[in-house]
C-alpha cells in the first residue's frame, strides 16, 4: 500500500515534533545576537479558523500528482506547506525570530530526506513572510512565515 498526502504530511509533522526544537536552538546559536526563541506549543495538522497557541507550526497538504515511467516506477509529488506563527512585543526581535524559524524549518526538512523509511526527496523550499498583525490572544505583535515544498516519492 502506498502512502497518501495525509500520510506524508503526518510523517513530516512527527519529524518536526521530534527534531525542530534542536534545529531552532542551533540556528539561534549561530547568530551574533541569540534571542532564545520559544519552541512551538502547537504542531497542528491542517488549517484552522482559530488562532493557535503561540508559537505554532501548522502542517498543510495541498495535493499530489502521480506519474509512471516506462519501467513501471511511480513518481509521486506531494505539495505541502508549513506555516509558523510567533508573537512578540518587539518588532525587530519578531522579524529576527521569524527568519530563524524559517531557517530551522529548512534545516529540519533537509535533515529528513527519509520519512518513515520512505526514500524521498524534499524540493522547492520557498519561504514567504507575512505582514505583522496583532495577536487576538496575547495582544502582542504577530507574524508568520510559510514554507512551501514538495516531497517526491519514487516507488515500484
Image (spheres, rainbow, N blue to C red):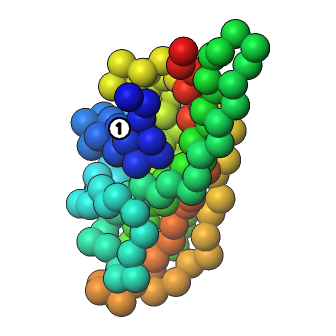
Quadrant showing the N terminus: top left
Indicate whether 32 appears above or below 138.
Answer: above
Quadrant showing the C terminus: top right
- Residue at (45%, 41%) from the top-left corner? 4
Left or right relative to 1: residue 68? right
* 96, 5: nearer the viewer: 5
Percent across and percent down for residue 75 are 63, 26
In the image as oriented, which residue stretches furthest toward the right? 70
How many numbered discs, if any?
1
Indicate whether 77 appears above or below 83.
Answer: above
Instruction: Report if residue 16 is visible in the image.
Output: no
* 33, 48: nearer the viewer: 48
Percent across and percent down for residue 37 are 34, 54
- What is the quadrant of residue 52 in the picture? bottom left
- Residue at (50%, 54%) from the top-left corner? 61
Instruction: Report if residue 42 is visible in the image.
Output: yes
In the image as oriented, which residue stretches furthest toward the top? 71
- Residue at (32%, 60%) from the top-left corner? 44
* 85, 58: nearer the viewer: 58
Percent across and percent down for residue 153 are 55, 26
* 129, 29: nearer the viewer: 129
Percent across and percent down for residue 42 are 26, 61
Tell me the element at label 1: helix
Label 1: which residue?
Answer: 11
- Residue at (35%, 80%) from the top-left corner? 51
Within-10-Å neighbours for mark 1: few <14, some 14–19, many 20+: some
Amino acid at each position: 500500500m502506498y502512502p497518501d498526502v495525509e500520510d506524508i504530511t503526518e510523517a513530516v509533522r512527527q519529524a518536526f515534533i521530534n527534531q525542530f526544537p534542536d534545529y531552532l536552538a542551533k540556528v539561534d546559536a549561530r547568530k551574533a545576537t541569540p534571542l532564545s526563541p520559544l519552541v512551538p506549543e502547537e504542531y497542528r495538522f491542517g488549517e484552522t479558523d482559530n488562532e493557535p497557541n503561540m508559537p505554532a507550526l501548522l502542517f498543510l497538504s495541498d495535493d499530489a500528482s502521480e506519474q509512471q515511467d516506462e519501467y513501471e516506477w511511480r513518481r509521486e509529488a506531494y505539495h505541502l506547506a508549513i506555516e509558523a506563527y510567533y508573537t512578540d512585543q518587539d518588532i525587530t526581535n519578531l522579524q529576527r525570530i521569524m527568519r530563524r524559524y524559517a531557517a530551522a524549518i529548512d534545516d529540519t526538512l533537509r535533515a529528513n530526506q527519509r520519512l518513515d523509511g520512505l526514500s524521498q526527496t524534499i524540493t522547492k523550499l520557498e519561504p514567504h513572510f507575512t505582514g505583522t498583525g496583532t495577536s487576538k490572544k496575547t495582544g502582542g505583535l504577530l507574524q508568520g512565515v510559510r514554507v512551501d515544498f514538495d516531497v517526491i516519492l519514487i516507488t515500484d
